[in-house]
Image (cartoon, rainbow, N blue to C red):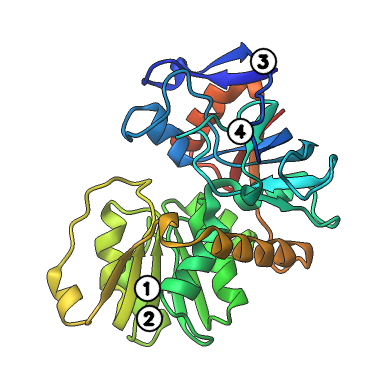
Amino acid sequence: MRAIQYDRFGDYDVLHPVDVPRPEIRSGQALVRLTLAGIQPLDDTVRSGKRGAVKPFPITPGGTGVGTVEEPGGSALAAGSRVMVSGGRYGVAVDGTWAEYVAVDPAHLLALPDGIDDSAAAALSTGAGYLTAYLALTELAGFRPGGTVLAPGSGGAVGQAGVEIARHLGASLALTTATSTAKAERSRAAGYEVIDLSRASLRDTVARLTDGKGVDVVLDGVAGPITGQALGALAWGGTLISIGYSAGIQADINVTDLIWKAAHVHGFLFALFTQEQINAANTKLLDLVARKEITPLVDRVFPLEQAAEAQRHLIEKGPFGRVLLSL
């Protein structure tokens, strides 16, 4: 089968196409024939050697994907069932989805409704933005209808999903940010309420839009300079959930924004949730996609053989929507 692998940590060029045998499923596993796989920041973190505890080389990257059940094995799903791979440590602890076939734990498979095509399902799962936003708001932040949410990064998974999920949960205001006027205009055209950081202050704009109160929740998938600004934009008793660090792992904060706002800060990890919670949330999200209440966006689809360029596109080009691999 065709796959992408790397046998050492390094830059994008360590990724290379290979022809390897189909994986043999162990007891209880299922074999999935993939049609689309997602490119996400974690893939870059692992490949560059910034994260430990990976399987021995060679490594097939990829944590998410969609396809059909080839061999049900221990799964209750029939052969030919369309599925989404979600959960587990694919591409890290075991070989992942940048391959024509992947062996999976059936607990990490969700059947796709007929009304959802592979592209929408792949965009939903890639980057896990929708799943993250849903769990962060409902399980960590205790979000209630009428509250306000800021999800910086209008082109990213958490930025886009944070706005859509907040709206679904009844937010009175759901904001994102853009680092350029061009991206801000594209965001507005896609239906997002966005702060153009090249023209306006985040803290001042949030204060104006909330009559000085600030936002109840920040879903911070950006970090870097944004974290301190977003913390300053919180309402009294507000919650900042730290999710990602696309703009850098260092942040400067004013500690009085923590103290005088009685702020809550959470770190987000999927390890905080059971597989049952994750599957229940994904089932809910798939239903929202089918009913067109949320619309995961795709920026670009690359052929499998161009995985290195696809990863570079995600990390360096600032895409607007998800980046996928076609198998």
Q: Residue at x 84, y 45 (%)?
A: 78
For label 3, count other residues whose C-alpha is less than 10 Å away and answer few (under 14), some (14-19) or many (20+).
few
Q: Are the residues tagged 1 and 2 within 8 Å (C-beta)? A: yes
What amino acid type is highlighted by mark number 4? Answer: Thr
Q: Are the residues tagged 2 and 4 within 8 Å (C-beta)? A: no
Q: Residue at x 47, y 18 (%)?
A: 58
- Disc 3 versus disc 4: distance between alpha carbons? 14 Å
Say which residue label 4 marks. 97
- Disc 2 versus disc 4: distance between alpha carbons? 45 Å
Q: Is residue 13 visible?
A: yes
What amino acid type is highlighted by mark number 3? Answer: Pro
Disc 4 on helix, strand or loop?
loop
| Residue 151 location (% of width, % of height) | 45, 64
Quick one: 146 or 214, which is closer to the camera?
146
Say which residue label 2 marks. 208
2 vs 325: above or below? above
For label 1, count other residues whose C-alpha is less than 10 Å away and answer few (under 14), some (14-19) or many (20+).
some
Image quarter hosting the N terminus: top right
